[in-house]
Image (cartoon, coloured by chain):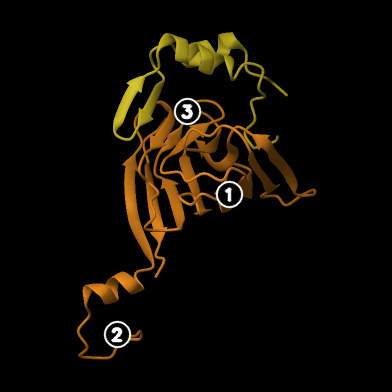
Chain colours: A yellow, B orange
């Protein structure tokens, strides 16, 4: 099964384009938050279904 | 006054409060390209049990939705059981075994964002369970059930994703009237 690479994720979700929301406040992730968020997905399978 | 009401009887506020079933507690619109949405002050001592319904938006890719109570990042247990629409093969399962969150409580894709589930006792200082989190994906559908084994009362929750982002849609929190 294909897995996410960092390059793929960075290309899909550029720094500054991913947000976090608390109630009605939506703000871009900081670069540090974004990098951590990207790293957390590297190596994960690209499932279309849970557990697939 | 006792239900069922009779013609001509005058309903009071107390009657309506006593007999309301599900009460809308909070509505939260989801923003654009968000990786998480925290909904604060969703749970209170007014209601013990809640139904949360999420719909109307889309995902940037095929996404399983996660749920976290307050700031707690441990002791989430649960299992999702799912099968294909073709109904071929044995139904499959995946689990959260002392995970940092419940990981399969809903689903999003380019054409939908969807979750619907009950939370039992999130604002009581006991374990919280999630029941009947039913979802439908592109080729499979399933149901998630689980328990958070921490005896803490929570007021907030965070909807998250396993990958990608969410755009649009609404989170609605309903309380089950304690009566």
Task: Please tell me if label 2 and label 3 are on a single chain.
Answer: yes
In this rendering, the answer to whether B33 lies above or below B115 is above
Subunit of label 2: B
Provide residue B23's location: percent of width, then percent of height. Answer: 35, 60
Provide residue A34's location: percent of width, then percent of height. Answer: 46, 14
Q: Residues within 10 Å of mark 2 (few under 14, many from 20)?
A: few
A39 relative position to B96: left or right = left
Q: Residues within 10 Å of mark 1 (few under 14, many from 20)?
A: some
Q: CA distance from mark 2 to mark 3?
A: 51 Å
Quadrant where the image shows the C terminus of chain B:
bottom left
At 66% from the left and 50% from the top, the residue drawn is B85
Tag 2–tag 3 contact (CB < 8 Å) = no
Sequence-wise first label, 2 or 3: 2
- For this orientation, the residue located farthest to the right is B89
| Element type where label 2 sits in the image | loop
Q: Give the labeled residue for mark 2.
A: B1
| Element type where label 3 sits in the image | loop
Sequence-wise first label, 2 or 1: 2
**Residue A20 visible to an observer of this rendering:** yes
Question: What numbered label is drawn on residue A5?
Answer: none
Dot in front, 3 or 1? 1
Q: Give the labeled residue for mark 3.
A: B60
Provide residue B22's location: percent of width, then percent of height. Answer: 39, 63
Q: Give the labeled residue for mark 1.
A: B127
């Amino acid at each position: 099964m294909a897995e996410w690479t960092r390059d793929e994720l960075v290309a899909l979700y550029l720094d500054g384009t991913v947000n976090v929301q608390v109630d009605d406040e939506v703000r871009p992730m900081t670069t540090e938050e974004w990098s951590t968020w990207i790293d957390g997905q590297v190596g994960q399978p690209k499932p279309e279904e849970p557990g697939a | 006054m006792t239900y069922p009401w009779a013609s001509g009887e005058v309903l009071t506020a107390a009657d309506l409060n006593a007999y309301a079933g599900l009460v809308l507690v909070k509505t939260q619109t989801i923003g654009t390209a968000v990786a998480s949405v925290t909904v604060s002050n969703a749970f209170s001592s007014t209601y013990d049990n809640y139904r949360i319904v999420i719909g109307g938006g889309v995902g940037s890719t095929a996404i399983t939705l996660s749920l976290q109570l307050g700031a707690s990042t441990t002791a989430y247990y649960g299992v999702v059981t799912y099968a294909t629409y073709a109904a071929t093969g044995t139904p499959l399962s995946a689990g959260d075994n002392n995970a940092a969150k419940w990981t399969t409580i809903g689903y999003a894709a380019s054409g939908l964002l969807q979750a619907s589930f009950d939370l039992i006792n999130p604002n009581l200082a006991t374990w919280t369970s999630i029941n009947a989190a039913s979802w439908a994906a592109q080729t499979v559908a399933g149901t998630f059930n689980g328990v958070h084994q921490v005896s803490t009362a929570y007021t907030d929750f965070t909807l998250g994703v396993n990958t990608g982002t969410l755009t649009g849609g609404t989170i609605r929190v309903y309380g089950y009237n304690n009566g």
